[in-house]
Amino acid sequence: MVLPAQIPSPQPSPRLGGAREQGQGPDAPPLALTVPLSRFTSRVGGGSAFFVRLYYTTMKSKLPDFSGKMVSIHSAREDTPCLIGDAHFEVLGGRLFVVGVVPRGGSAGDWVAGLPTAFAWDKVQDYIIFDSAADYAKRVEMYDKKKKRRKA
């Protein structure tokens, strides 16, 4: 049995500059090594995948509902937005993505139409939700007409 008088008090680490000044010698353990790692890591699941699943599960109710919609997604590093049909959220490689299919008219010359695509949700600067591909095409047509009128 250890009596309270025998329990050593926590000692400052020499790496922090306190132990040597107080004359406790260089053999005092660093503070970081005296705290068990289990205090910082999760005992259930653990790791970043656990965090992402937990984050995704909690955020799921706060994420936009893209079901049956056409979504135009824009990031700060891209000049043109990415158009995604049948968009939904998936966790891929520990990150949250908007996943779907590139619709007809969604790329210059339709060279990627019908192919699956994914966009990292943490890279989204802004997005626009259209009711359908027809709604998107109608609005693009309206924009093009206004643009032509301005040039004339």
Image (cartoon, helix red, strand yellow):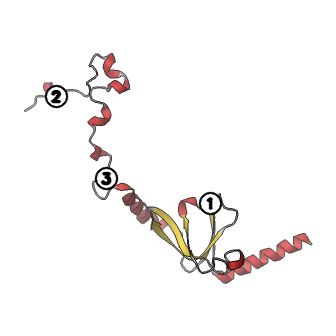
Residue at the disc numbered 3: 42
Inter-mark Cα distance, 2 to 1: 56 Å
Query: Camera-side residue: 83 or 134?
Result: 83
Residue at the disc numbered 2: 7
Q: Residues within 10 Å of mark 1 (few under 14, many from 20)?
A: few
**Going from the N terminus, do you reach mark 3 or mark 2 first?**
2
Picture coordinates of residue 36, whole percent (x, y):
26, 42
**Can you tell which mark lies on residue 91?**
none
Q: Residue furthest front?
A: 111
Picture coordinates of residue 47, whole percent (x, y):
36, 55
Question: Quick one: SS at disc 1?
Answer: loop
Residue at the image position 28 percent from the left and 16 percent from the top: 23
Q: Quadrant of residue 126?
A: bottom right
- Give the residue type that dot 3 points to: Ser
Query: Camera-side residue: 62 or 91?
Result: 91
Would you say 150 lies left or right of 125 here? right
**Residue 33 seen in the figure:** yes
- Give the residue type that dot 2 points to: Ile
Residue at the image position 92 percent from the left and 72 percent from the top: 152
**Going from the N terminus, do you reach mark 2 or mark 1 first?**
2
**Going from the N terminus, do you reach mark 3 or mark 1 first?**
3
Residue at the image position 54 percent from the left and 63 percent from the top: 121
Marks 3/1 in contact by CB < 8 Å: the verdict is: no
Q: Residues within 10 Å of mark 2 (few under 14, many from 20)?
A: few
Picture coordinates of residue 91, whole percent (x, y):
45, 66
Residue at the disc numbered 1: 125
Marks 3/2 in contact by CB < 8 Å: the verdict is: no
Measured along the vertical axis of the image, is residue 60 above or below residue 77?
A: below
Mark 3 or 2: the one toward you = 3
Q: Residues within 10 Å of mark 3 (few under 14, many from 20)?
A: few
